[in-house]
Amino acid sequence: MGIVTFVDETTAGERRTAWGPETAEERLTVRELIRRRVFQEVAEYNARRRCPGGSCSPRTPSAC
């Protein structure tokens, strides 16, 4: 199992929160790493959008 850590950095040098997916595969393409990151970010964005106060569970969006 391996871990890859993504760290976002702006052109001004500001660093943002790191993100690291755990992988069971021994080898992954960069394309697959990017695909997984985009999928994760979209899922997090959609969860925040459904529950703006953060009080509901992604499993029960109707409780918002």
Image: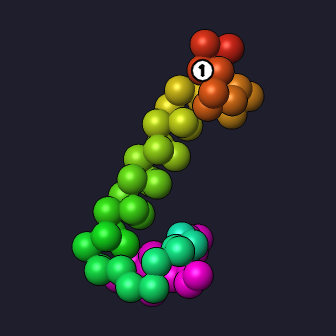
Kindly indicate the quadrant of the structure image that contains residue 48: top right
41 sits to left or right of 11: right
Query: Label 1, on which residue?
Result: 61
Q: Is residue 57 magenta?
A: no
Please state if 12 lies on the left or on the right of 32 as rendered. right
Of residue 30 and residue 44, the one placed in the foreground of this image is 30
Residue drawn where x is 70% and y is 26% of the image: 56
Name the residue nearer the viewer: 59 or 46.
59
Of all residues, the one furthest to the top in this rendering is 62
Query: Residue 1 location in percent, x, y?
Result: 58, 82
Q: Which residues are magenta?
A: 1-19
Where residue 21 appears, x then y in whole percent? Answer: 54, 70
Tell me which residue sits at (69%, 29%) in the image: 57
At 74% from the left edge and 28% from the top edge, which residue is drawn?
Answer: 55
Question: Which residue sits furthest right?
Answer: 55
As for residue 4 lying within the magenta part, the answer is yes
Foreground: 9 or 46? 46
Q: Name the residue nearer the viewer: 59 or 64.
A: 59
Q: Does residue 54 lie above or below 41 as drawn?
A: above
Give me the residue at 68% from left, 14% from top: 63
Which quadrant: the C terminus? top right
Q: Is residue 16 visible?
A: no
Residue 4, compared with residue 50, is above or below; it is: below
Decide if residue 32 is on the left or right side of residue 44.
Answer: left
Q: Position of residue 5 (x, y in %)?
A: 53, 81
Color style of the picture = rainbow
- Using a 10 Å C-alpha cutoff, classify the residue at mark 1 as few (fewer than 14 neighbours), some (14 to 19) or many (20 or more): few
- Amino acid type indicated by mark 1: Pro
Q: Secondary structure at mark 1?
A: helix
